[in-house]
Image (cartoon, helix red, strand yellow):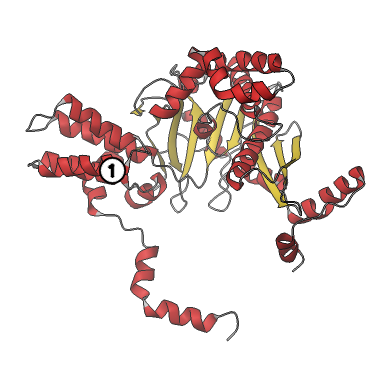
């Protein structure tokens, strides 16, 4: 039997039960008992189902390719594309990262470079008269979480300053012109909705508790629930303390804290607890404590922040004044970054959910991303956003006609990178552009 099929059959038959359990969507009873009713209360039918794609919608996306070179360096290419009835807008970046840079830094830098390309085409789209909505592929909340620090990339240490300069202009331009920004994630792994539900449930339990729960204990519980990076040792100590207390209220709180320490994604939660077409109640998101403190210091003590975060770069620079000017122009404006309103939607009963991020100002909320506000459910109107999403919905195989089309066109395929772009560079520099042996073995196989 070819391709190890016989071995695969034996492997599966040895433990069929485990395979079936791994593919099931069953949740622990604690999710259903503690969060099921609350999740249903925050699940609504679609406010509108548009049959026709609205005018003025621009779809944007980007792609990355990297290649390991013979000398240990990394060649990278990123592309951004915006598609609309007004025509295509393209942006391309490429360069070489020295071999001294770690793989983790290469991945982060190239990901930021791709977002930069996407933001570039979005900004150019925002300058067009006929643009009403700009669709971003992925998380808008995530784009506002990057801390403005030196990246450890030679010749491009200050890239995040340029990144935020561009992003701030994009957000300002869209708000000035009344253009909606809608970021759509089709495979989100976040647990924001879950944590908001847990927080609401804990508020309800403490409000009706039969025993006194001190304000200090409530704050510790909230911190454990809302911080994805909450130290495991401290969490275990808090859980032990909670489980030692008697009563169903304490049992419920302990279970909720335990769920928050090992959360499932919002989309898994929705698939298990919520049925049919609909969307979750929108809720407001801001930064967690650690990145908030860093961001606030960047605009509240700008010169001190520059000296601390960019000191070594400034010392090594031939033009330190240029760095100071750039940083002083960008960092104070970070206080203008908006909070994000987010929700999840299922546009067809048999489809998986999508996550949607919009700037808070689109629904009349004036909070900023750095404000110490716990996630809170909102009473707000997102009918215009749902009109765009349902008007562009093409079924389970085509979650958004604009984003699917732009993804197909912007994607960097192997033939384009390894034949076309490589040949262009070799012709321009009049030299061979050799990959390392490991990649060549895969490429030519």
Q: Secondary structure at mark 1?
A: helix
Residue 265, relative to residue 215: is it above or below?
below
Residue at position x 45%, y 54% in the image: 350
Q: Is residue 151 left or right of residue 360?
A: right
| Residue 255 found in image quarter | top left
Residue labelled with disc 1: 233
Q: Give percent across and percent down for residue 112.
A: 62, 36
Q: Residues within 10 Å of mark 1 (few under 14, many from 20)?
A: few
Q: Give percent across and percent down for residue 68.
A: 71, 52
Q: Is residue 3 visible?
A: yes
Residue at position x 63%, y 46% in the image: 404
Instruction: Please identify the residue farthest to the bottom as the structure is shown.
Output: 1
Q: Quadrant of the C terminus?
A: bottom right
Q: Give percent across and percent down for residue 291.
A: 45, 28
Residue 425, relative to residue 141: is it above or below?
below
Q: Give percent across and percent down for residue 256.
A: 24, 42
Q: Quadrant of the N terminus?
A: bottom right
Q: Is residue 262 left or right of residue 414?
A: left
């Amino acid at each position: 039997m070819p391709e190890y099929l016989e071995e695969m059959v034996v492997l599966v038959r040895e433990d069929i039960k485990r395979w079936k359990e791994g593919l099931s969507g069953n949740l622990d009873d604690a999710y259903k008992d503690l969060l099921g009713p609350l999740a249903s209360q925050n699940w609504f039918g679609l406010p509108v189902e548009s049959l026709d794609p609205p005018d003025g919608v621009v779809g944007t996306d980007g792609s990355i390719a990297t290649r390991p070179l013979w000398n240990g360096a990394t060649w990278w290419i990123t592309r951004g594309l915006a598609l609309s009835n007004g025509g295509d807008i393209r942006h391309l970046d490429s360069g070489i990262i020295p071999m001294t840079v770690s793989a983790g830094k290469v991945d982060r830098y190239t990901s930021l470079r791709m977002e930069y390309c996407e933001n570039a085409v979005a900004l150019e789209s925002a300058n067009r008269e006929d643009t009403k909505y700009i669709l971003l592929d992925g998380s808008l909340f995530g784009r506002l979480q990057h801390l403005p620090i030196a990246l450890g990339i030679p010749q491009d240490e200050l890239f995040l300053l340029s990144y935020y300069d561009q992003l701030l202009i994009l957000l300002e331009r869209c708000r000035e012109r009344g253009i909606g920004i809608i970021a759509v994630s089709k495979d989100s792994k976040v647990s924001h909705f879950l944590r908001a539900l847990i927080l609401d449930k804990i508020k309800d339990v403490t409000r009706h508790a039969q025993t006194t729960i001190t304000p200090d204990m409530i704050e510790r519980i909230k911190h454990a629930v809302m911080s994805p990076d909450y130290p495991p040792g401290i969490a275990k100590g808090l859980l032990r303390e909670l489980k030692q207390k008697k009563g169903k209220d304490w049992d419920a709180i302990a279970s909720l804290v335990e769920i928050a320490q090992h959360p499932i994604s919002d989309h898994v939660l929705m698939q298990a607890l919520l049925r049919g077409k609909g969307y979750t109640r929108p809720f407001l998101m801001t930064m967690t404590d650690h990145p908030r403190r860093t961001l606030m210091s960047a605009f509240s003590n700008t010169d001190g922040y520059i000296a601390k975060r960019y000191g070594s770069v400034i010392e090594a620079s031939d033009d330190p004044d240029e760095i100071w000017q750039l940083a002083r122009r960008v960092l104070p404006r970070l206080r203008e970054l908006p909070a994000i309103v987010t929700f999840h939607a299922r546009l067809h009963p048999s489809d998986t959910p999508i996550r949607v991020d919009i700037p808070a100002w689109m629904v009349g909320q004036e909070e900023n991303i750095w404000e110490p506000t716990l996630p809170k459910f909102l009473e707000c109107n997102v009918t215009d956003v749902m009109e765009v999403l349902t008007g562009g919905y093409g079924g389970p195989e085509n979650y958004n006609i604009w984003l699917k089309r732009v993804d197909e066109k912007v994607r960097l395929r192997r033939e384009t990178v390894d034949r076309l772009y490589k040949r262009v560079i070799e012709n321009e520099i009049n030299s061979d552009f050799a990959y390392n042996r490991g990649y060549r073995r895969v490429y030519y196989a």
